Amino acid sequence: MYKLMSPAEAAELIQTGDVICVNSFVGIENPIELHEAIYRRFHETGRPHDLTIVSSAGFGAWDEHRNAEDYIREGAVSRIICGHFGAMPSTKRLVLEDRFEAYNLPLGCISHAIHAQAGGLPGALSKVGLDIFCDPRREGPGINRISHDETLVTLVEVGGEEFLYYRLPKLNVALIKGTAADRFGNISFDDMYMSGDALSICQAVKANGGKVIVQVDRLVTTPSRPRNTIIPGCLVDVIVQTEPEPRPVAFKALTGSFEIPYEEWRGWQEMIDELSSARVRSNPAYNTIGRRAARELRPDDIVNIGIGIPETVAKYARKNGMLDRITLTVESGGIGGFPASGTVFGAMIGAASVYDMANQFDLYDNGSLDICFMGAFEVDRHGNVNAHRSPDAYPGIGGFANITGKTPTVVFCLTFNTKGLVMERRKDEVTIIENGTVPKFVEEVRSISFSGQRALKNGQRVLYVTERCVFELTDRGLKLTEVYPGVDPERDILSLLPFDVIRG
């Protein structure tokens, strides 16, 4: 039977050396009060320490003094295994300072490994990750100089085929955020943006003899409908009821609490963008890329659109009448709505369905997407892409590797160069006024997030759409297939590349 506790009482249950699994998605649905109670206890007593934190999609509040950031920074954590570090500003920096062990695995592979552990299996097989940075034949998943755990990802052969085997340490504490708990301890997620890995995390922790701690907004006497109960009370050890943070009506729209017809998506998106500090500003280069990339959409496509420049694809899909003829998806489990961005990335406007994250990555890993649009830091002569490691930061791979691993058409959306790029577009003509000082097309990428060689083996069609031209991946390297009107091929493209390309 579960116990009702305060955040401070729940924090007392966490012991030195525990392996905590957090159910969250980048910056949303974090059990913030639980994290901050752990910090207060550690700050006052020095316990617990030597913690391991596992999170498939990352955990953070876009604020280095909220959520888990303080106790990570003060030394309570010795190891983090995470898909994405983007919403954790101080943790992201400390990773590169070797302050603790840090490992980056593809988001979907962590999700599937959690699900496997819930079923009593030690790990999960996947082809995702082969030939990219986390492949042990390349860099492996360790981010910094002190991260050398070789058990997390191993190369295996099954039936004559190569796979990567993803194995996590045994999870023994679950930190979950839910909406409500009824008198039996059943947890519903009615007002949540997503449920993520919640059920699998609880099952895995209970199988390992651990503790499931759930923070909820309210206690209710009337049970939720059985289908709306994500975590049954028999899996819950502790419930912590806290006052919910107030949400503006624009964010409430993302919970699915009321229907949002297609014709209202744009208005809700604009309201959410106004509240988000991480929105993509209007930019002629980004708009040029989005307009061209959106031409690749076909009716009935199942689609994933990445954050950053790719978000402009949705804008032009609306303008050309394709947005209501395709099905958009987001990694957290949403299908059939319009993905939100910025601080609420992972939520959807008008979703038709939101299910468990592991199921979403089944869809991605089995190749059921028709097309995806993704960003990139760098592209090299082999068509390899680095999208997870910049010179001074490590946001992480997130769901990128799963999304691009088997999707038939992969469209990378990036500027030709950056840091000072100035261009203008009048009607259909593009003029490059000044090139940026940092090239995006390089001889060799710093780290591989996407393998051009494996994409060719898979028979995938791969495009690289920029503000001045389009390249396509071939077995002889990149092919320049399209130069926009007003662009001089020699001056604006070829003379700036560090390698030769095939002329279309």
Image (tube, rainbow, N blue to C red):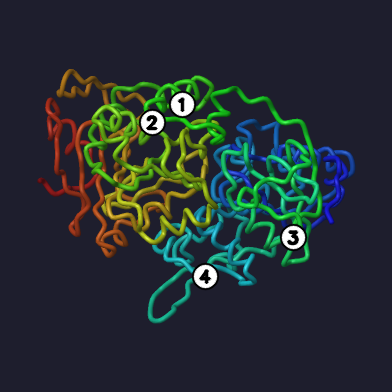
> Mark 1 packing: few (<14 Cα in 10 Å), some, or many (20+)?
some
The first of marks 3 and 2 along the sequence is 3
Task: State the residue at coordinates (78%, 35%).
Answer: 242
Q: CA distance from mark 2 to mark 4?
A: 45 Å
The first of marks 1 and 3 along the sequence is 3
* Labels 2 and 4 touching (C-beta < 8 A): no
Residue on which disc 4 sits: 154
> Mark 2 packing: few (<14 Cα in 10 Å), some, or many (20+)?
few
Of residue 101 and residue 272, the one placed in the foreground of this image is 272
Q: CA distance from mark 3 to mark 2?
A: 43 Å
Q: Which numbered tag is attached to residue 279?
A: 1
From the viewer's perspective, tell me whether residue 144 is left or right of residue 170.
left
Residue lying furthest bottom? 159
* Labels 4 and 1 touching (C-beta < 8 A): no
Q: CA distance from mark 2 to mark 1?
A: 21 Å
The first of marks 4 and 3 along the sequence is 4
Q: Which numbered tag is attached to residue 262?
A: 2
Residue on which disc 3 sits: 172
- For the N terminus, the quadrant is bottom right
> Mark 4 packing: few (<14 Cα in 10 Å), some, or many (20+)?
some
Which structural element holds mark 3? loop
Q: Amino acid at mark 3?
A: Asn
The first of marks 4 and 1 along the sequence is 4
Of badges 4 and 3, nearer the viewer stands 3
Of residue 191 and residue 131, the one placed in the foreground of this image is 191
Percent from the top left, x then y, of residue 323? 31, 35
Q: CA distance from mark 4 to mark 1?
A: 38 Å
Q: Amino acid at mark 4?
A: Thr
Of residue 196 and residue 130, the one placed in the foreground of this image is 196
Q: Amino acid at mark 2?
A: Tyr
From the viewer's perspective, tell me whether residue 199 is left or right of residue 326.
right
Task: State the residue at coordinates (53%, 58%).
Answer: 141
